[in-house]
Image: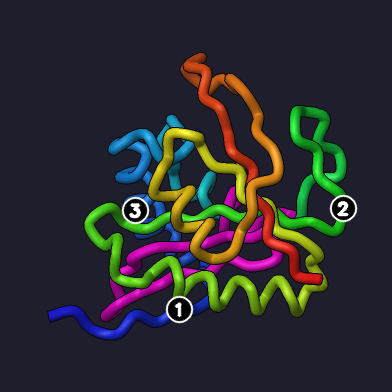
Amino acid sequence: MRGTIRTRPATGADAGAMCALLNAVIAEGGTTAHQRPFDEARLVGHYISPPRSVSCTVAEDGGAILGFQALEWCDPDWRGPGRLPPDWAVIASFVAPVQQGRGIGVALWAATIGAARAAGVRSIDATIRADNHAGLRYYGGLGFQDYDRLEALPLTDGTPVDRVRKRFDLT
């Protein structure tokens, strides 16, 4: 029997479970630009407590982590494609493949949007692989709107994949 999904801020103690979840998503393929598995230190630095963190929230049921969502201010020094204004944040969402369809992403979004408003974020960018149909549906269902497309950006293995850029405006 499935219990109640709860959200809370992620901590370093969650890194192992978050790695297992994210690495399963990476291994399944097709939904994230990440191709290299994470270890705990990399996950902490990339999602739980990066220098520009706004929030990182986990969803759990009975102590098991089912998903997580991270929000961080855009990098003002970014020189690659798709530079964003300084009052924008970027979002990343991951749900365990076997847990999708339970409302986990919606529960995570409720916590994230509250943190974004409290921090004064103006807009949130979700840059999604164009072939990630579930991710595109998820963000569209939350009210994100398409605003740009980055064409043929290579994954780490060199495979070119388009990215759809969606935004959610808070002001």
Camera-side residue: 148 or 48? 148
Going 38% across and 70% down the picture, which residue do you hit? 104
| Disc 3 secondary structure class | helix
Labelled disc at residue 83: none
As displayed, is residue 157 above or below residue 84? above
The kind of residue tagged 3 is Leu
Q: Mark 1 points at which residue?
A: 7
Mark 2 lies on residue: 86
Q: Where is residue 16 in the image (x, y as percent from the top left)?
A: 38, 56
Which corner quadrant of the image does residue 148 belong to? top right
**17 w.r.t. 31: above or below:** below
> What's drawn in magenta, residue-wise?
45-72
Left or right, 151 with respect to 118, comes to left
Q: Do the residues labelled 2 and 3 touch (CB within 8 Å)?
A: no
What's the residue at 56%, 20% (across, down)?
154
Mark toward the start of the polypeptide (2 vs 1): 1
Q: Residues within 10 Å of mark 1 (few under 14, many from 20)?
A: many
**131 up-or-down from 161: above or below:** below
